[in-house]
């Protein structure tokens, strides 16, 4: 009888401890998940940017070396214009700490960030149109305008090279 009582008492103590343990681990796990998701978000938006940068690099290769690749510039520029729609969702969450070069200003002036996206999209469409048009001399200025649109966002919203997380 006494034995039974002490066992059930111990099991009560044990299960209370278990509940605390489970609660403890699950909240720590949730916290870790949040951090992991944030890191993944930062990586994702950098991938979106890298894709844009790769397309820009490919166009530069074609132009600099006068590669005969009919339709290629318009294709790359079209992909860049389409990628504009990925930028706002990729940056929606306010994450300016950690392995990122995004400045806090993005979330302090979201409207200005969106307007930089719109200008970039317009410039990319402009290059796609120029590259598929009959006047080859229109391509250079359209490419320069697209390059300017990157700076139009990077300057206010991306950390300078010397402050980049990549240097740390
Ligand atoms: C609307 C804003 C915006 C526009 C437009 C924009 N960028 Fe970016 N870009 C950013 C921000 C912000 C970062 C930093 C992201 C981070 O580190 O989290 C970035 C980062 C990058 C990176 C580095 C990615 C990495 O792996 O760390 C490249 C490359 C890049 N941009 C290329 C371009 C090019 C090329 C253009 C124009 C054709 C362009 N971007 C237009 C905002 C923009």
Image (cartoon, rainbow, N blue to C red):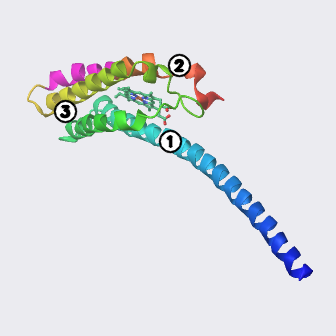
Label 2 CB less than 8 angstroms from ligand 1: no
Quick one: label 3 or label 2, which is nearer the N terminus?
3
Q: Nearer the viewer, residue 30 or 43?
A: 30
Q: Are marks 3 and 2 in contact (CB under 8 Å)?
A: no
**Whole-percent x, y for residue 93 in the image:** 45, 34
Considering every residue shown, the one lying at the far left of the view is 134
Write down the quadrant of residue 120 in the picture: top left
- The residue that disc 3 covers is 128
Binning the other alpha carbons within 10 Å of mark 3 as few (below 14), some (14 to 19) or many (20 upward) gives: many
**Whole-percent x, y for residue 78 in the image:** 22, 37
- The residue that disc 2 covers is 160
In the picture, the disc for residue 43 is: 1
Residue at mark 1 to residue at mark 3: CA–CA distance? 28 Å
Secondary structure beneath dot 2 equals loop
In the picture, the disc for residue 77 is: none
Residue at 22%, 25% in the rendered image: 122
Q: From where the camera sits, is residue 147 visible? A: no
Residue at 53%, 46% in the rendered image: 37
């Amino acid at each position: 009888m006494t034995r039974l009582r002490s066992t059930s008492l111990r099991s009560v103590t044990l299960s209370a401890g278990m509940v605390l343990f489970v609660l403890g681990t699950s909240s720590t796990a949730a916290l870790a998940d949040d951090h992991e998701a944030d890191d993944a978000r930062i990586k994702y938006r950098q991938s979106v940017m890298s894709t844009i940068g790769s397309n820009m690099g490919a166009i530069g290769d074609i132009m600099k070396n006068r590669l005969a690749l009919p339709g290629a510039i318009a294709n790359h520029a079209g992909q860049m214009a389409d990628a504009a729609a990925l930028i706002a969702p990729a940056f929606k969450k306010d994450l300016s700490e950690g392995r990122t070069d995004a400045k806090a200003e993005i979330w302090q002036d979201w409207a200005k960030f969106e307007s930089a996206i719109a200008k970039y999209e317009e410039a990319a469409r402009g290059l796609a149109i120029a590259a598929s048009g009959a006047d080859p001399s229109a391509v250079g200025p359209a490419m320069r305008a697209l390059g300017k649109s990157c700076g139009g966002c990077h300057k206010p919203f991306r950390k300078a090279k010397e402050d980049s997380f990549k240097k740390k």
